[in-house]
Image (spheres, helix red, strand yellow):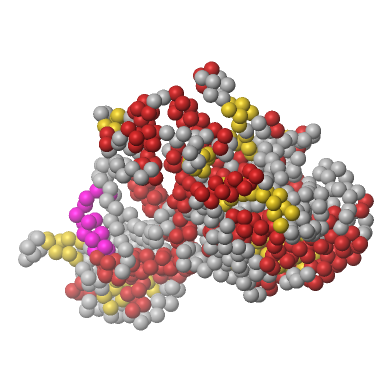
């Protein structure tokens, strides 16, 4: 602060020394008008910068404004306080915690000089003259903890000469020229002179010379070792500053060594019977999320806190860890489920709790963010269940960090842009449109970047708005959208059946331009699918630009880029692209990020979350992610779509099975949500289980088809018998599973998934010869047929006329080489939800095909897919309430 000549001289010496040994050092200059707040702001910035390992505040502070020096020195983070002047470092030094603090550089240099003499400090009598916080006081502490008997003298010491005469080691930092006389010194003493004083000397050009606090010429005759002034302690002070900076960097690298975790796990207090999910969640006290981040090696500037229990993680962590090897990649899927679900989320959480809290492996769960629609509808939340949950479950199931709201806003902006553009094109001439699209600002007309891209797409290589011909202006301003081809719908994250078909544009201000439209639920938006498949901001923005919203009347695809809305959508999504960090009940880390539909989209959490997690766990760690619905849907899309775009290769498939679902596939009565299970599901029936294992066998084959080892997790319910569970394990192994184990994690947490965790560890060491099912260059129909025959067991496929037209259209438009994302029922391997087990010989009807070009896939519709759920007679919201006293949420499950 300021511009003192002496301070600049000292700083330049330090910068020169740093350059000589390869330390990158910078001088931050604040003017003498700087306030205390200005200095504190600068310090805070350096404290949070992981690229800075140490810094000093040059004293004195040369400011025209009053500045509290103590406050400034204490504002420096102790781990970066290489000058050792903060109260925390001083306190640690005074307590003898020398390995856990930074020592002021001058005393540290003095001790190094004493050590270089070869004289043992222990047992010697030492005298320190001076008691400043910078030299005298810390020098006293250093000598004391080196087992010397130390006396501190100062300006009020009446017997100074007598005390000096007793010293085997004398350190002088009084700031008074030649105050210690040679005759005071004990013969053979070690004398360290820290003083720098100027005395008159007419023989010097400057009229003065530098002397120390000790009369050097006489003292050197009695001392065995003595430091000269200048040239003694000064250079050592600079050297110790360099050493402390190197130590700081070493500590930082040790502390944040990639893959080196120090996780504090939470111990569960299990209760029987198992309480409700929300009761268990509320009984858990989660760790502060910044502690979780620190435990897994994230740097402070890589984490954005959203309260105490959730945070966003910056994508910059990928660049920092780009040379870190990935961990083991595990996907959790399931057999064809009942409408109640078979516990994939619970198994995912149980597995990571077992691997982390019980086997002490670095492990991350990566799961989808649930829609709020089902939370208030019939399904309830999706945070796992029992003693295997992501917590707090109410945060997980409700707003989280607002990603779904951002998607809603971005999606509806695109929808609004479509209708507004059609309206304006229908009501204005070419020239009027052009004047408004490229307005004159201060007499200058200029294309925006996105408009330049549209011109280039049209083959118009001009940048001057005045240079376009009438024909070029017409092509530029007219998207000429065919309303019947619009595939982009408005969205809302609420189950609302009455928005499935609506009429828009009924106000008189829209001049009669109305059309039929609909609302979908937010998680079905292509923007959600893009978020899940993007590998960074740039990739996400490019995908947004490619999103096809309709076709022109000439059959050309109309994109978000054509609408000019790509950049605005990216801005709305700039925070949503960062994964959300949470934790499990047992304190293992979880990324909750993206939640695309598992039918019209690929049903997997984000690529970015998986990539960051794989770097953080290190080569011996595990990342466990979950694929939506059964293996025929979520797992197939995980392999053929997500892994294709991410470049990641899985090591293990965990296939979740239940006795309940297998009984259903064996011919048991219908299972209906909200209705008590028939007795066939609550009493032992080995025949039903054995018959239903046909579905298990087929799903094991499906996983093995991709070349990945399969571990079957038999999720045990309290009504299952030992014989039934053993039968499932036996069938799974006979069908080719690497291993099959019973799991009781819902009731026991990670402990109940230990056998599963050990099986996954073993399977991850087995060969994994991962391969895709198809080459994307195959014709669209061939890719669909391969999935239908190889994964579902169909004899063939049948394309209805609308689907045939779409195949021709998308192939013509250049989208024929995209992967396939089948949209079919999750309740059967076939298109008919009533067909259980492993049906064969059926023909799969393809009703229609649609394109999510930005996300990067075509999705054939097998039957009718509802993209806006409705509310049942008795929705979950009847039981959801807020305690106004405690603020606790009740009734979520």
Residue 267 position by quadrant? bottom right
**Residue located at (25% from left, 45% from top):** 32
**Left or right position of 636 against 199:** right
Was residue 8 drawn as part of the magenta stretch in this picture?
yes
Image coordinates of residue 864 in percent, x first then y, are 70, 42
Image coordinates of residue 893 in percent, x first then y, are 75, 44
Looking at the image, can residue 345 be seen? no
**Residue located at (48% from left, 39% from top):** 554
**Residue located at (32% from left, 66% from top):** 23
Residue 336 or residue 296, whichever sits in front: 336
In the rendered view, tell whether residue 425 sits above or below residue 6: above
Residue 632 position by quadrant? bottom right
Residue 371 position by quadrant? top right
Residue 801 or residue 766, whichever sits in front: 801
**Left or right position of 862 against 659:** left
Image coordinates of residue 720 in percent, x first then y, are 87, 59
């Amino acid at each position: 602060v300021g511009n003192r000549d002496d301070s600049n001289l000292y700083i330049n010496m330090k910068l020169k020394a740093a350059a000589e040994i390869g330390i990158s050092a910078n001088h931050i200059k604040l003017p003498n008008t700087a306030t205390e707040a200005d200095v504190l702001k600068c310090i805070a910035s350096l404290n949070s910068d992981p690229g800075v390992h140490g810094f000093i505040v040059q004293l004195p502070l040369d400011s025209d404004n009053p500045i509290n020096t103590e406050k400034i020195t204490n504002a420096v983070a102790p781990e970066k306080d290489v000058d050792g002047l903060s109260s925390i470092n001083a306190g640690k030094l005074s307590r003898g915690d020398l390995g856990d603090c930074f020592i002021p550089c001058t005393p540290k240099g003095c001790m190094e000089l004493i050590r270089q003499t070869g004289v043992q400090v222990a047992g010697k009598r030492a005298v320190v003259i001076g008691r400043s916080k910078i030299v005298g006081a810390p020098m006293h502490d250093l000598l004391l903890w080196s087992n010397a008997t130390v006396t501190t003298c100062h300006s009020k010491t009446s017997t100074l000469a007598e005390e000096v005469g007793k010293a085997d080691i004398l350190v002088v930092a009084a700031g008074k020229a030649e105050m210690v006389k040679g005759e005071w010194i004990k013969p053979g003493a070690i004398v360290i002179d820290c003083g720098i004083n100027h005395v008159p000397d007419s023989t010097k050009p400057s009229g003065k010379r530098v002397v120390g606090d000790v009369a050097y010429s006489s003292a050197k005759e009695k001392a065995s070792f003595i430091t000269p002034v200048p040239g003694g302690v000064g250079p050592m002070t600079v050297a110790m500053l360099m050493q402390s900076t190197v130590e700081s960097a070493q500590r930082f690298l040790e502390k944040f060594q990639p893959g080196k975790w120090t996780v504090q796990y939470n111990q569960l207090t299990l209760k029987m019977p198992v309480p409700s999910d929300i009761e268990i969640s509320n009984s858990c006290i989660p760790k502060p999320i910044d502690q979780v981040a620190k435990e897994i090696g994230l740097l402070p500037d890589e984490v954005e806190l959203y309260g105490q229990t959730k945070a966003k993680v910056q994508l910059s962590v990928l660049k920092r860890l780009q040379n870190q090897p990935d961990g083991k990649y595990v996907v959790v899927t399931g057999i064809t489920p009942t409408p109640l679900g078979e516990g994939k989320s619970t198994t995912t959480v149980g597995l990571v709790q077992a691997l982390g809290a019980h086997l002490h492996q670095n492990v991350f769960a990566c799961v989808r963010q649930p829609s709020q629609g089902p939370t208030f509808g019939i399904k309830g939340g999706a945070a796992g269940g029992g003693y295997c949950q992501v917590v707090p479950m109410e945060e997980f199931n409700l707003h989280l960090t607002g990603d779904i709201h951002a998607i809603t806003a971005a999606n509806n902006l695109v929808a609004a842009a479509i209708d507004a553009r059609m309206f304006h094109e229908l009501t204005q001439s070419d020239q009027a449109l052009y004047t408004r699209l490229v307005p004159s600002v201060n007499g200058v007309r200029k294309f925006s970047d996105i408009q330049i891209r549209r011109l280039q797409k049209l083959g118009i290589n001009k940048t001057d708005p005045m240079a376009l011909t009438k024909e070029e202006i017409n092509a530029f301003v007219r998207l000429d959208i065919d309303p019947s081809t619009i595939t982009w719908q408005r969205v809302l994250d609420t189950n609302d059946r009455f928005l499935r078909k609506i009429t828009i544009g009924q106000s008189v201000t829209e001049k009669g331009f109305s059309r039929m439209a609909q609302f979908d639920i937010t998680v079905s938006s292509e923007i959600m699918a893009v978020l899940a498949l993007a590998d960074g901001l740039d990739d996400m923005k490019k995908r947004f630009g490619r999103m096809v919203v309709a076709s022109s009347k000439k059959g050309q695809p109309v994109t978000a880029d054509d609408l000019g809305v790509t950049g605005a959508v990216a801005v709305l999504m700039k925070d949503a692209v960062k994964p959300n960090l949470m934790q499990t009940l047992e304190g293992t880390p979880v990324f909750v990020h993206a939640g695309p539909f598992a039918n019209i989209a690929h049903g997997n959490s984000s690529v970015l979350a998986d990539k960051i997690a794989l770097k953080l766990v290190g080569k011996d760690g595990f990342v466990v992610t979950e694929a939506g619905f059964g293996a025929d849907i979520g797992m197939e899309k995980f392999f053929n779509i997500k892994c294709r775009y991410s470049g990641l290769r899985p090591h293990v498939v965990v296939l979740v099975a239940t006795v309940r679902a297998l009984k259903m596939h064996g011919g048991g009565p219908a299972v209906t949500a909200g209705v008590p299970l028939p007795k066939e599901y609550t009493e032992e029936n080995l025949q039903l289980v054995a018959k239903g294992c046909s579905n298990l066998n087929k799903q094991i084959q499906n996983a093995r088809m991709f070349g990945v080892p399969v571990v079957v997790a038999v999720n045990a319910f309290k009504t299952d018998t030992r014989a039934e569970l053993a039968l499932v394990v036996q069938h799974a192994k006979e069908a080719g599973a690497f291993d099959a184990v019973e799991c009781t994690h819902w009731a026991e947490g990670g402990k109940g998934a230990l056998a599963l965790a050990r099986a996954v560890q073993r399977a991850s060491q087995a060969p994994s010869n991962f391969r895709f099912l198809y080459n994307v260059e195959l014709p669209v129909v061939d890719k669909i047929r391969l999935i239908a025959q190889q994964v579902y067991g169909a004899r063939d496929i049948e394309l209805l006329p609308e689907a045939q037209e779409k195949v021709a259209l998308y192939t013509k438009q250049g989208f024929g080489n995209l992967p396939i994302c089948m949209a079919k029922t999750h309740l059967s391997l076939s298109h008919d939800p009533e067909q259980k087990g492993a049906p064969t010989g059926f023909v799969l009807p393809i009703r229609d095909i649609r394109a999510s070009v930005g996300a990067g896939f075509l999705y054939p519709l097998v039957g009718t897919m509802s993209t806006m759920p409705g509310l049942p007679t008795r929705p979950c919201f009847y039981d959801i309430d807020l305690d106004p006293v405690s603020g606790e949420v009740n009734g979520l499950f």
